[in-house]
Image: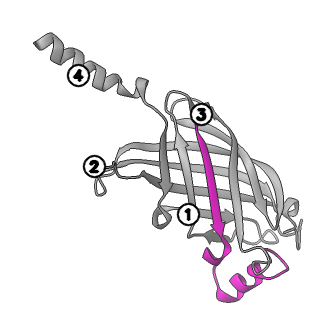
Amino acid sequence: MRKILLATALFALAGSAFAAPVAYKLDATHTDVLATWNHFGFSNPSAHFGAVEGTLVYDADQPTASSVEVTIPLSGLAGFSEKFDAHLRSADFFDAEKFPVATFKSTRVEAAGEGKLTVSGDLTIKGITKPVVLDVTLNKVGEHPMRKVPAIGFNAVATVKRSDFGLGLYAPVVSDEVKLSITTEATAAPAAHH
C-alpha cells in the first residue's frame, strides 16, 4: 500500500511533466502595460495602458504550443495629466477615435531558460502591424488562493520604435524607442461541475 501511495505522490509531483495546455483569461484589474520614454533628455515619463483584455494558452512541457492574444483599449490609457492623455489620444499620436484599440497576437513562443520565455508576435497600432519580441519572466503558476482555479502570472519587457506605428512626432529629440513593461495575472475558467 505504501508503495502505491509513494508512486501516487511521485506522479503528483511529476504532474507538470504530463500537463496539458491550460487556457487562461487575463485579469484586467491585475494587468498593466507601462510605456516609458525619454523627453528631450530631461525626464523619463511614462503612460499606463489599462483595461487590457486577452487570453493566453500556456503549456509548461511544450512552450511552443503556448500562445497569447491581447486587446488594449486606448480608453484605458493614463499618463501623468489629463491634458497629456488627451494629446496622446489625438491624431498627433494614437488617433484613438479612429483606432480605439491596439492588439498583440503571438506568432511564436520559445523557452529561454528556467522560468523565461521569448514571445514573438504582431503588434498592431493605428492599423499598422509590426513584429515585436517580448522577454517574459514567469512569476508563478498555481492555484489562485481566492478564486480556487488555476492561475498564472508573468512580467514581460520589450522595446518598440513608435515611428514604426505612425507615432513618431518629435522623434528623435523625444526618444523614438519606447520601453514597454508588462505585468499580468490570468486565471483559468472554473471547472464545470457534473
Q: Quadrant of residue 113?
A: top right
Sequence-wise, the earlier of marks 2 and 3 is 3
Count neighbours of disc 3 (C-alpha within 10 A) and say few if under 14, some if 14 to 19, many if 20 or more: some
| Disc 1 and disc 2 in contact, CB within 8 angstroms | no
Instruction: Identify the amino acid type marked 4.
Output: Ala
Q: Residues within 10 Å of mark 1 (few under 14, many from 20)?
A: many
Instruction: Check residue 115 for magenta coloring.
Output: no
- Residue 100 screen position, x and y as percent: 72, 74
- Mark 2 is surrounded, within 10 Å at the Cα level, by few (under 14), some (14 to 19) or many (20 or more) other residues, namely few
Structural distance between the alpha carbons of marks 2 and 3: 27 Å
Horizontally, residue 100 falls left or right of residue 54, namely: right
Amino acid type, residue under disc 2 in the picture: His
Q: Which residue is mark 3?
A: 65
In terms of secondary structure, where does tag 2 sit? loop
Q: Secondary structure at mark 4?
A: helix
- From the image, state whether disc 4 or disc 3 is nearer to you: 3
Residue 124 percent coordinates (x, y): 77, 59
The residue sitting at the left extreme is: 1
Closer to the N terminus: mark 4 or mark 3? Answer: 4
Residue holding disc 2: 193
Q: Which residue is mark 1?
A: 32
